[in-house]
Amino acid sequence: MSFLPPLHSDSNEKSLECLWGSNCNDKTKEHVNHFRHSQTSKFDHKHIDPCRYGPNCRLQFATNNSVHNSKYSHPCRFAEQCRNADKEIYLTHEPLNVKLCKYDKNCRDRTKPNHRCQYQHTDLPYYLIPCRDQPNCRNQSENHRMKYSHGEHIDPLQVNKYEKKKDM
């Protein structure tokens, strides 16, 4: 059995409540038949540990990610710019407080993961999805590299330090 959310059991075995509530993404028949989904979710990402890999985590995007994502929180790729924060309760939306890139949509560095999290670009996330092939990836197209990172280490805490030093 694979359940996306962490589970909470009430005193009655038949009344298991899914902690994701109405935000649950597990639509399997087995899950729906065994768990109720109230409109108010008790799940709070602040009560689970952050994943040590942060935006570099490949497991958060894997098809069998339910156990990992129920144990660890991950930063939202769009951070404070996210338009779905109310629906993505399993992600953190901490502000990066970075400046808009002066080249924005004409920027040549939009395929570079470190640049992307150091500068805001219109309609683009700060963090790229880790490519499953990482440094062994053969797809070097600009479209692919705009969406996927390839093993470059991104540390969200270092991003803000970099900006502060640069401004001094």
Image (spheres, grey):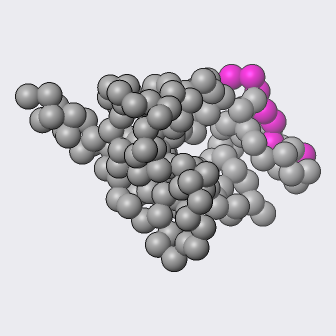
The structure residue drawn at horizontal position 15% and vertical position 34%, both measured from the top left corner, is 166
Taking the view exactly as shown, the residue that stands out farthest to the bottom is 136
Quadrant showing the C terminus: top left
> Residue 22 lies in what quarter of the image?
top right
**Residue 148 on image: x %, y %:** 54, 55
Inspect this view and state whether residue 48 appears: no
Relative to residue 77, is residue 52 depicted above or below? below
Quadrant showing the N terminus: bottom right
User: Considering depth in this image, is 139 or 62 the residue closer to the camera?
Assistant: 139
Magenta residue check for 37: yes
The structure residue drawn at horizontal position 43% and vertical position 38%, both measured from the top left corner, is 107
Relative to residue 52, is residue 42 depicted above or below? above
**Residue 87 on image: x %, y %:** 66, 28
The structure residue drawn at horizontal position 59% and vertical position 60%, both measured from the top left corner, is 141
**Residue 112 on image: x %, y %:** 41, 51
Q: Is residue 121 left or right of residue 11?
A: left
**Residue 8 on image: x %, y %:** 65, 43
The structure residue drawn at horizontal position 19% and vertical position 38%, both measured from the top left corner, is 161
Inspect this view and state whether residue 164 appears: yes
Q: Is residue 1 left or right of residue 87?
A: right
Q: How many marks?
A: 0
Relative to residue 48, is residue 65 depicted above or below? below
Magenta residue check for 158: no
**Region of the chain picked out in magenta, as a range:** 33-40
